[in-house]
Image (spheres, rainbow, N blue to C red):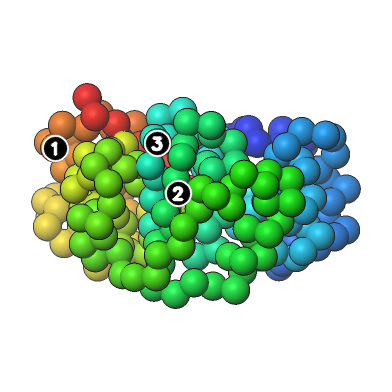
Amino acid sequence: MTPFKAFRNFNDPALRPLTGVRARIHPDSAQYFPGDGLPQRIARALCARKAVPVKEVFESFEFFERTRRRARATEMADLCCGHGLTGVLFAAFERRVDRVTLVDRRRTASFDTVLDAVASEAPWVTDKVVYLERSVEGVGHALAPGTAIIAVHACGVRTDRCIDAGLATGGPMALMPCCYYRTAADAPVALRRALGRRDATDVHRTYRLEAAGYRVDWSAVPAEITDMHRILIAVRA
């Protein structure tokens, strides 16, 4: 069983099932985030504003805790970012991070709510975060060399386009794939048959990254949050 790192009180078996709830986080949920630490204060601010679904809060915080030391860089990009919480967490907690570019086709209303919540406790984030409305296709060439790439649930082959971006910038990557529809098309048939599409896809992605000079590790957030919980972490060897 994968432990919770960001909010360790949720390792209580009675609380773990609450972390995958898809309803919006609510002011009443603030009771589950006691304490004066910055993560707890930010979580309570998200509760107060009903910013995003409960699942999204835990997904972003647990992904961040597992990738922050290896995926961070001065410049970062959160691709297919949606509400942008994951990228904003890097801006809030990592002093080394000077700029986070959030990329998605459309800036969502929930992003403004998320940024307001985090900025209420970490006001420096507003000077670090930029939202870029565009496709992830070819975005690596619009980013500074060395930019770190993160992506939480970039659907299907969009995760592969995020890898393209990371290879273009040459920076570290941390990716949580999902929705493996139409993926692994060029993976060996034997892998697809023996492992299934999901595992075959990520094995194939791992080989691709290793061939490009990266060292790849697999990690995961707790399965109670999402069944698509694998994280691929790739750093230049």
Q: Residue furthest front?
A: 127
Residue located at (88% from left, 48% from top): 31
Horizontal and vertical percent for residue 126?
59, 52
Q: CA distance from mark 3 to mark 2?
A: 9 Å
Which quadrant is home to the N terminus? top right
Of the numbered discs 1 and 3, the one sitting upstream in the chain is: 3
x then y, percent, for residue 30: 84, 51
Judging by the rendered image, the residue that carries numbered circle 2 is 100
Left/right of residue 92 with respect to residue 106 in the rendered view: right
Q: Position of residue 201 (x, y in %)?
A: 25, 52
Amino acid at the residue labelled 1: Ala
Quadrant location of the C terminus in the rendered image: top left
Label 1: state its secondary structure.
loop
Q: Residue 212 shows which numbered tag?
A: 1
Which residue is depicted at the point 83% across and 34% down?
36
Instruction: Decide if residue 69 is on the left or right side of residue 60.
Output: left
Q: Which residue is mark 3?
A: 74
- Per the image, label 3 sits on a secondary structure element best described as loop
Q: 236 or 32: nearer the eye?
A: 236
Taking depth in this image into account, of 207 and 191 the one nearest to the observer is: 207
Alpha carbon distance from label 1 to label 3: 22 Å
